[in-house]
Image (spheres, grey):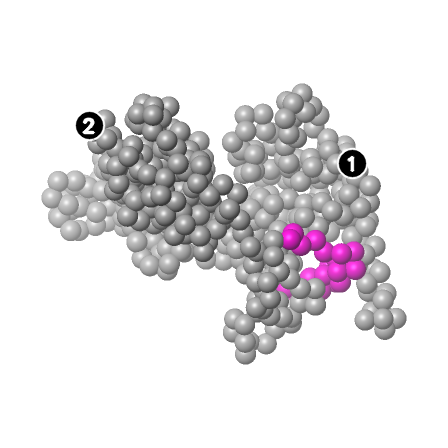
Amino acid sequence: MKFDPRAAKLLKPGELLTIDGCPGLRLVASDTRRTWTYRYRSKVDGKVKQVALGQWPAMPIAAAAGAWQAARDARDAGRDLADERRIARATTSKPAMISRGSPTVREVASAYLAGHVEKSRKAKGATEVARMFEKMLGNVADLDAPTLTRSQAFELIESHAGIPVQAAKLKAELGAAWDYALDAGRLPESTPNWWRQILRGKLKSTGKKIAGEKIGTSKRVLSASELGALIDWLPNFSRLVEDALTLYLWTGTRGAEIMAMTGAEVNEEGGCLWWTIPKAKTKNARHANATDLRVPLVGRAERVVRRRMAQCNAGYLFPSESGPGHTQQKVISESVFFRQPYCEIRPKWARARLTVTRWSPHDLRRTTRTTLARIGCPSEIAEAILGHMQPGIVGTYNLHAYDAERLEWLTKLDAELERLAAGHFRSLGAGQH
């Protein structure tokens, strides 16, 4: 990584320097400053974009390289930094006006986004709230918040009734924004929070359709016979997808945790391979009393991880094929859908079609939890295996780690999954299928 400060000083407006070993990192000169920028192709829409990282010489080359690496990792994780900053500017450009008079709906939403959401949620969640406020407020955005009527609030949410889940999320976030503004004194105390009162219990998902057939909102769990058949079918997927789905079944962990797994998180303890998922990578990261998730790797899970560690060492075990970072969770979901018999994407593309259908990768996590219950695993141990925090006062006082119990029941799960797979194989040999 070579950088010549003299060459940087001599740059003319419009000229730039590139940095060896840091693709996309540039020092761009204008009339008044030298700006570090990261130029990249978005994984969201495929467009070439760029974001500013800082000013030189205030940001030296080492700091710029660190900011470039962080930005590149974010891009590889599926985020679009340029769009995130644009949305943030759009939603935070007016909050200062709130103190000078009656705030608009947009200003109330912006203050809530900047003061609460961006501080308490992960970047992905905060970006989604910002996107909702930018895209879904419509004409209501510029209305006076204290005088917003019940019918105006109703009309906004009703206009999105065709997407009831998103409409319910918008309603909930606006209700929280109003509470935040009332607590902060940005709205008169007499201001009603219509978002809390309208359409209560009326915005519910009607479920999805598959191949034109409405299947409702029921949760998919594979039966014992389906599970055995699917395990035998897994080698029809690519090795990456097969390995990921195997870990879903043999560990019960979430897809995001599996895809971000690194060799550095795996250690051998007492003759068993253990995967310690950092708290920050789990869904419980926002809870103060949450801990790292400990996962014993048994049977096929152990073999998958050992094989991948031999290739990737301490790095990501499911590395991205397009650059640094790891493979995205949606790659697994898309691969499963592409193999479903009702998938019409590239219909002329020859590929083996799934014999066990109408499931998604997350359904395998649900199936693992159900299988644990079926073979007699106590509920509190099964919940600990999945990384669910115990509710209420139990979660406050029961701080047992359950390591021994996790190992015991995942070992029993391994035996059950292998029994189902072997039983399906024998039935095929007997000509029963």
Residue 163, x across and y down, in percent: 46, 54
| Furthest-right residue in this view | 430
Residue at the outermost bottom position: 348
Residue 35 x/y as whole percent? 22, 42
Residue type at mark 2 is: Arg
Badge 2 element: helix
In magenta segment, residue 225: yes
Left or right of 422: which side holds 211?
left
Part of the protein shown in magenta: 218-238
Q: Amino acid at mark 1?
A: Pro
How far apart are the alpha carbons under marks 1 and 2? Answer: 58 Å
What is the x, y in percent for residue 425? 82, 65
Q: Which residue is mark 2?
A: 100
Residue 2 is situated, as x and y percent measured from the top left of the image, at: 30, 45
Q: Quadrant of the N terminus?
A: top left
> Principal SS element in the magenta part?
helix
Q: Residue at x 31, y 37 (%)?
A: 148
Residue at 54% x, 29% y is 287
Quadrant where the C terminus sits is bottom right
- The residue shown at (39%, 36%) is 194
**Residue 135 horizontal side relative to residue 274, left or right:** left
Characterize the local packing of mark 1: few (<14), some (14-19) or many (20 or more) Cα atoms within 10 angstroms: few
Q: Is residue 356 magenta?
A: no
Q: SS for tag 1?
A: loop
- Considering every residue shown, the one lying at the far top of the view is 397
**What is the crowding at mark 2: few (fewer than 14 residues within 10 Å), some, or many (at least 20)?**
few
Answer whether residue 233 is visible to the viewer in this image. yes
Residue at image location 13% in from the left, 40% down from the top? 32
Is residue 106 or residue 356 the one in the foreground? Answer: 106
Based on the displayed image, in which of its 4 quarters is residue 391 positioned? top right
The residue labelled by disc 1 is 378
